[in-house]
Image (cartoon, rainbow, N blue to C red):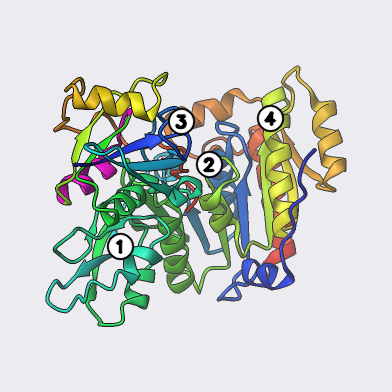
């Protein structure tokens, strides 16, 4: 029995609001290795070729690689910091409210001193909020970086989590904040998410006009497509399917059935294509390197549809 | 001395619990008189940081030492800072009474290094 999850209208409002008017589309898909980044990069490149100013956002902060696919360096780094409590032993009255408030149980009150940070602080600042004697100062801890790289009409924003750190959502949020500040003049924002359907994917998807779920006709593809479409349904984000490697002798029928279940159209089928592989190896988007390739034609057609729908 | 033993139940004849932060009960046993206090582990059901939270509860009961199966690095650190001695290696088939008897015979050794990596408990590491 699957427990149906639904969110309050108020939550949906927050999830689906955007601080700027620029349209936002996301390239996602539950499964890893289905071609999300390749397709995101090629859609971005096709739109640039059509003359649009595009902000591509690599929100796969655990392993960002759009810059490798585009063969451009990561530049203009900014640290992503989260708060850390610094407790002033002189001001602290040992009231322990911070210890009792910390939901991570990261603070510990020894016998004879002010509380110390022992567990894993996630920077929520509740301790600072409850401290009645103003004894906790805001320290900082770096959890990752964001970058901005520019290449003609393409701006690539990249988020990068420090390996072994768990605050991937913080980096995604900081990345999006930077994008919304610095990419106001773009015609469109394209967000390339991590695989999966967890917090950092949710934060990457928030505010999207439409999310394209990339999948392939394999049992794994079907399974993970189900997950991501379920998530998009919960979030009330319009979902569309991109079927990659569509001519694999697989389970296209099952993909169609999932498509019907979630009322998510298959917008494009991209066949397996040697030229796409060649371009991938070279680190050049296929739509630039081999515009005549079948994959290029189909991605370019999808890009034109996206432009027609969202760019005024 | 006041010895805290991790327990599956609320009396001396209950079986010991191998876990520290996730043990259902802590029995704070006076090893001289066998009188004891029962502390229900309210941290048991929480997500992260059960070990540190449990260490806090034990410290508040003035236990001088903890006897358990195995203890995580955060709780280990917390107890060390609070000068609470740590003994590991409880056998799952013993009752609390039997464990205390063994303790008094010196069968357990104090540990001075945390046994292993983080995440021994069942708390989710992700989720944010």
Q: Tag 4's secondary structure?
A: helix
What is the CA distance from the residue labelled 1 to the residue labelled 3? 48 Å
What is the CA distance from the residue labelled 2 to the residue labelled 4? 16 Å
Q: Tag 2's secondary structure?
A: helix
Camera-side residue of A200 and A27:
A200
Q: Are the residues flagged by discs 1 and 4 from a single subunit?
A: yes
Q: Earlier in the sequence, mark 1 or mark 2?
A: 2
Residue, disc 2: A37
Inspect the magenta stretch and tell me whether residue A282 lies in it: no
The local crowd at label 3, few if under 14, some if 14 to 19, many if 20 or more residues have their Cα within 10 Å, is some
Magenta segment range? B69-81
Residue, disc 3: B14
**Residue closest to the far bottom:** A133
Chain letter behind tag 3 = B
Counting labels gives 4
Quick check: A301 above or below A77? Answer: above
Quick check: A91 above or below A200? Answer: below
What is the CA distance from the residue labelled 4 to the residue labelled 3? 50 Å
Residue, disc 1: A81
Left or right of A303, for residue A257 = right
- Residue A221: numbered disc: 4
Query: Is residue A259 visible to us here?
Result: yes
Inspect the magenta stretch and tell me whether residue B71 lies in it: yes
Q: Which circle, 1 or 2, is nearer the viewer?
A: 1
Query: Is residue A73 visible to us here?
Result: no
Q: Earlier in the sequence, mark 2 or mark 4?
A: 2
């Amino acid at each position: 029995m699957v427990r149906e999850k639904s969110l309050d209208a108020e939550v949906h409002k927050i999830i689906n609001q955007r601080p700027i008017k620029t349209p936002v589309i996301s390239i996602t898909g539950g499964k890893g290795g289905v071609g999300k980044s390749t397709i995101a990069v090629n859609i971005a490149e096709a739109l640039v070729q059509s003359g649009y100013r595009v902000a591509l956002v690599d929100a796969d902060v655990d392993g960002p690689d759009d810059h490798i696919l585009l063969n451009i360096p990561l530049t203009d780094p900014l640290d992503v910091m989260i708060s850390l409590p610094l407790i002033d032993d002189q001001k602290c009255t040992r009231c322990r409210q911070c210890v009792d408030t910390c939901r991570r149980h990261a603070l510990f009150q020894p016998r004879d001193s002010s509380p110390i940070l022992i567990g894993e602080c996630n920077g929520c600042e509740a301790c600072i909020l409850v401290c009645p004697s103003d004894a906790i100062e805001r320290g900082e801890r770096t959890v990752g970086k964001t970058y901005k790289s520019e290449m003609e009409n393409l701006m690539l924003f990249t988020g990068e989590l420090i390996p072994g750190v768990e605050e991937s959502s913080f980096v995604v949020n900081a990345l999006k904040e930077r994008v919304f500040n610095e990419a106001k003049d773009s015609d469109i924002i394209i967000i390339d998410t991590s695989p999966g359907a967890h917090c950092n994917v949710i934060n990457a998807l928030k505010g999207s006009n439409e999310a394209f779920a990339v999948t392939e006709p394999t049992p794994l593809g079907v399974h993970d497509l189900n997950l991501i479409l379920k998530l998009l349904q919960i979030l009330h984000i319009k979902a569309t399917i991109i079927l990659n490697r569509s001519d694999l002798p697989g389970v296209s029928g099952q993909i169609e059935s999932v498509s019907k279940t979630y009322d998510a159209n298959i917008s494009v089928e991209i066949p397996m294509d040697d030229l796409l592989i060649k371009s991938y190896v070279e680190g050049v988007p296929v739509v630039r390197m081999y515009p005549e390739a079948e994959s290029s034609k189909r991605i370019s057609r999808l890009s034109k549809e996206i432009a027609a729908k969202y760019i005024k | 001395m006041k010895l805290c033993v991790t327990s599956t139940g609320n009396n001396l004849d209950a079986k010991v619990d191998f876990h520290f932060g996730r043990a259902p009960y802590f029995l704070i046993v006076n090893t001289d008189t066998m009188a004891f206090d029962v502390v229900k582990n309210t941290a048991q059901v929480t997500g992260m940081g059960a070990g540190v939270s449990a260490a806090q509860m034990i410290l508040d009961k003035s236990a001088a030492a903890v006897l358990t199966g195995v203890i995580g690095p955060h709780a280990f650190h917390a107890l060390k800072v609070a000068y609470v001695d740590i003994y590991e290696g409880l056998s799952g088939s013993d009752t609390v009474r039997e464990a205390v008897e063994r303790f008094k015979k010196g069968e357990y050794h104090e540990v001075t290094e945390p046994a292993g990596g983080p995440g021994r408990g069942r708390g989710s590491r992700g989720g944010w």
